[in-house]
């Protein structure tokens, strides 16, 4: 099992110890370091800044939001960081949700699957650099010939030769169609709130995509976000995790279109999801956290003694996970997780 350190996105201020965490991740054998973005800090700059002090760990985005950049602009970021890191970059993409896409980026959210397919196709063209980039699709037409166009657009190839034509593209996906699309067109799946109990269901979705593309599962990566904590007091850790779970169920999506809530509904926690959503929308966030069952937290995290963590990691690996994305916030935790997962 490989380990990835998830730095996430910043709060009101940059984290104070991120450079120390990245150095520790490299020292203790982590495979990769990831950064995210929401509507504050971006994901590329922290990787370039802190990753410049590393030589081995891969540097990935988990995730960058497609609506934040055109496909060509995203490809420019990716090929640049891949060169700077000596071929260690992983481009993790996600569609985000309508509240962010339409409220922050001012772009339409409709048809996320079709947009993702076009976006990745353009990225692949840029990285291959075999011909000037063209796209006839309605979402990212190249050259642009729509309203306001002067008709002078010219198909172009990137000036800078990408270091790797096969730069890995991973997709953050939650629903069955998104996951199937991921295995069809991408190199890896960034899974949030993965539950090994449902591995058979996930594999059916993935197999649908593999069947459409004729691609193999052999080199496909499944990177699951999972809080891994080595502790003799698992109950206290689960209690600390519950507010974050409640936030994603009740507050990180629009009422009636919350993809995170749908994940837990598919896991069989529909009544809990409804109660958390109602309490969260009423501003009763503490009560919403108390509704989160211990069983739910245990399904999506690995918490316990080093021996217990080691057993659970093996179970997740058997379920098909190749990388665990963990959110350690101090060097001691990074060392403990690395040792327990050996």
Image (tube, rainbow, N blue to C red):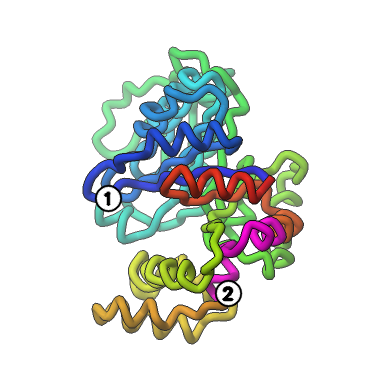
Q: Is residue 299 magenta?
A: yes
The residue at the point 59 percent across, 70 percent down is 299
Q: Quadrant of residue 269?
A: bottom right
* Residue 100: percent from left, percent from top: 31, 55
Marks 2 & 1, CB-CB < 8 Å contact: no
Dot 1 surroundings within 10 Å: few (below 14), some, or many (20 or more)? few
Nearest the viewer among 324 and 215 is: 324
- Name which of mark 2 and mark 1 comes first in the sequence: 1
Answer yes or no: is residue 254 visible.
yes
Residue 156 sits above or below residue 320 on the image: above
Residue 266 image label: 2
The residue at the point 64 percent across, 55 percent down is 180
Q: Quadrant of residue 197?
A: bottom right
Residue behind mark 1: 11
Q: Which element is circle 1 on?
A: loop
The residue at the point 36 percent across, 34 percent down is 46
The mark closer to the camera, 2 or 1, is 1
Q: Quadrant of the C terminus?
A: top right
Dot 2 surroundings within 10 Å: few (below 14), some, or many (20 or more)? few
Residue 314 sits above or below residue 254 on the image: above
Q: Answer left or right for 176 relative to 200.
A: left
Answer yes or no: is residue 208 visible.
no
Chief secondary structure of the magenta portion: helix
* Residue 290: percent from left, percent from top: 39, 81
Q: Which element is circle 2 on?
A: helix
The residue at the point 45 percent across, 35 percent down is 22
Query: Magenta residues?
Result: 296-312
């Amino acid at each position: 099992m490989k380990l990835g350190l998830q730095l996430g996105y910043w709060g009101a201020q940059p984290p104070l110890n991120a450079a120390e965490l990245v150095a520790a991740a490299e020292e203790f054998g982590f495979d990769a370091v990831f950064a995210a973005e929401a509507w504050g800090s971006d994901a590329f700059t922290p990787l370039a800044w802190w990753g410049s002090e590393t030589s081995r760990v891969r540097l990935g985005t988990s995730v960058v939001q497609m609506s934040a950049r055109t496909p060509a602009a995203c490809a420019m970021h990716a090929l640049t960081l891949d060169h700077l890191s000596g071929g260690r970059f992983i481009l993790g993409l996600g569609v985000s949700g309508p509240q962010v896409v339409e409220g922050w980026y001012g772009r339409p959210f409709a048809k996320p699957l079709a947009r993702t397919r076009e976006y990745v196709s353009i990225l692949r063209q840029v990285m291959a650099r075999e011909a000037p980039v063209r796209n006839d699709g309605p979402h990212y037409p190249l050259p642009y010939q729509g309203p306001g166009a002067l008709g002078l657009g010219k198909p172009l190839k990137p000036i800078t030769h990408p270091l790797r034509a096969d730069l890995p593209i991973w997709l953050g996906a939650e629903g069955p169609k998104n996951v199937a699309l991921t295995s069809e067109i991408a190199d890896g799946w960034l899974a949030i709130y993965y539950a090994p109990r449902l591995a058979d269901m996930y594999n059916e979705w993935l197999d649908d995509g593999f069947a459409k593309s004729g691609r193999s599962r052999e080199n496909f990566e499944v990177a699951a976000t999972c809080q891994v904590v080595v502790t003799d007091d698992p109950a206290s850790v689960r209690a600390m995790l519950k507010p974050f779970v409640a936030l994603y169920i009740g507050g990180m999506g629009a009422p009636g279109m919350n993809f995170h809530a749908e994940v837990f509904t598919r896991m069989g926690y529909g009544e809990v999801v409804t109660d958390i959503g109602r309490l969260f929308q009423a501003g009763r966030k503490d009560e919403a956290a108390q509704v989160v069952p211990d069983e739910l937290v245990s399904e999506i995290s690995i918490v316990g003694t080093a021996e217990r963590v080691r057993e659970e990691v093996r179970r997740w690996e058997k379920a098909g996970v190749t990388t665990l994305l963990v959110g350690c916030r101090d060097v001691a935790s990074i060392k403990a997780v690395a040792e327990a997962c050996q």
